[in-house]
Image (cartoon, grey):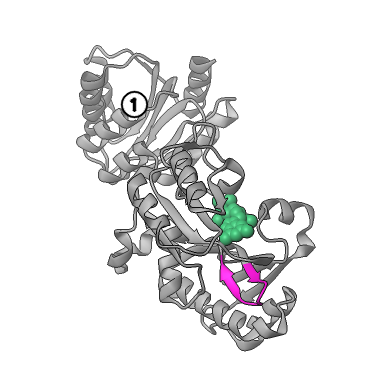
Amino acid sequence: MKIHEYQAKELFREYDIPVPEGYAALSRDEALENIKKFDTFPIVVKAQIHAGGRGKGGGVKLASTKEEAEKFVDEIFGMTLVTHQTGPDGKEVKRILIEQGQNIEKELYLSLLVDRETASIVIMASREGGMDIEEVAAKTPEKIIKVYVDPLMGISGYQLRQVAFGLKIPKNALKEFTGMVKNFYDLFVQKDCTMVEINPLIITSDERVTALDAKVDFDSNALGRHKELIKLRDLDEEDPLEVEASKYNLNYINLDGNVGNIVNGAGLAMATMDIIKNAGAEPANFMDVGGGATAEMVENAFRIILADKKVKAVLINIFGGILRCDVFALGVVEAAKKTGITIPVIVRMEGTNVEKGKEILSGSKLELTSAMDLADAAEKIAAAVK
Ligand code: GDP
Ligand code: MN
């Protein structure tokens, strides 16, 4: 689960990670009110959306007067901000953070991630902060420092110093910096994060460290033990169809292709996406209704996929085990009645009560195409979207 920059900075304050003075607003008026809290300039007006790259997209503006700040609030609030992470449609700005401007001497990069390969927490740092870290990693990987921390051992002093020396932190800021990284590590572990990132982490002209940006991603599977974090969720920032699917416990992820698919079981869903790609088409989603799905869940799954405008055909691939084929078929028929299908639907069904399931589907007067097997299904779905 992702949160906004201003929420992440609240969390940083709790962990004694230095951040600039700042106030967040949920309305334009409130943002204008917040400007009055500053009497030293410049101040920074920052669009709050979950995607990064806001600076380049025009969502971060440095104002040297109160009037200029008001102008930026007017421009940014409600704007559709397009960055390389939002996709071409962009994201409407509904929250604004106003912050005290900082004197930047050097912009650094710092993040913590779970590294599955070594089963450790990796600290990534670079003197090439502020800019696109993916580009630094691709072109000049030697400019990224990596320190691996065994989560059972915890972080040690020498590892903190390794990061500090790698970043050439000025002597006067060393103690503050290592203390900050230690706190950053504690936050990561205690809040069950999958990623925390500060880009840029700045050294100010008076040699202090400050987090100018903040990104935090929590492990959604661990939210059960962090009730205080759940209220930070902003559904406006999430894919509406994914939010809808999560209400029914459906494992759904929206993708870029045009072949919608409904499958029972995550492994079968992965395999189905593979065969769709193999046949030269692109999956529009991952949808696992689960082994024990009810007719109602199937109905909701089908409805969600049909609501996705980019879907040009649907492939249903069901292996009837705990979810019997007849129960599944009833769900499909119900959903089809309610939504009306105007696109081709190809069905491949095997397993428990398959005959009964097929009877239900063929007796329903729905225009469905059945497939003999997986290969046949793939061929038919690719032909349908060509
Ligand atoms: P992002 O583009 O979404 O990653 O947003 P950031 O919060 O990283 O802001 C983008 C850029 O704005 C930073 O890399 C800084 O160069 C600049 N910036 C942000 N706050 C300040 C500030 O207080 N003073 C100055 N001079 N620049 C700032
Ligand atoms: Mn940034």
Residue 185 lies in magenta, yes or no? no
- In front of the other: 246 or 22: 22
Q: Position of residue 88 (x, y in %)?
A: 54, 32
Quadrant of residue 312 within the rendered picture: top left
Q: Quadrant of the C terminus?
A: top right
Ligand 1 is found in the corner quadrant, namely bottom right
Q: Residue at image x 61%, y 79%?
A: 177
In the displayed structure image, the side of residue 25 where residue 181 appears, left or right: right
**Most prominent secondary structure in the magenta stretch?**
strand
Q: What's under tag 1, amino acid-wise?
A: Ala
Magenta stretch in the rendered image: 202-211
- In front of the other: 241 or 107: 107
How many numbered marks appear? Answer: 1
Q: Is residue 17 above or below residue 137?
A: below
In the displayed structure image, the side of residue 260 where residue 342 appears, left or right: left
Q: Is residue 249 above or below residue 194?
A: above
Quadrant of residue 322 within the rendered picture: top left
Using the rendered image of the protein, determine whether residue 334 is visible from the camera's viewpoint. Answer: yes
Residue 203 lies in magenta, yes or no? yes
Q: Is disc 1 placed on a helix, strand or loop?
A: helix
Quadrant of residue 137 within the rendered picture: bottom right
Q: Position of residue 55 (x, y in %)?
A: 59, 48
Q: Position of residue 123 (x, y in %)?
A: 62, 71
Q: Which residue is mark 1?
A: 307
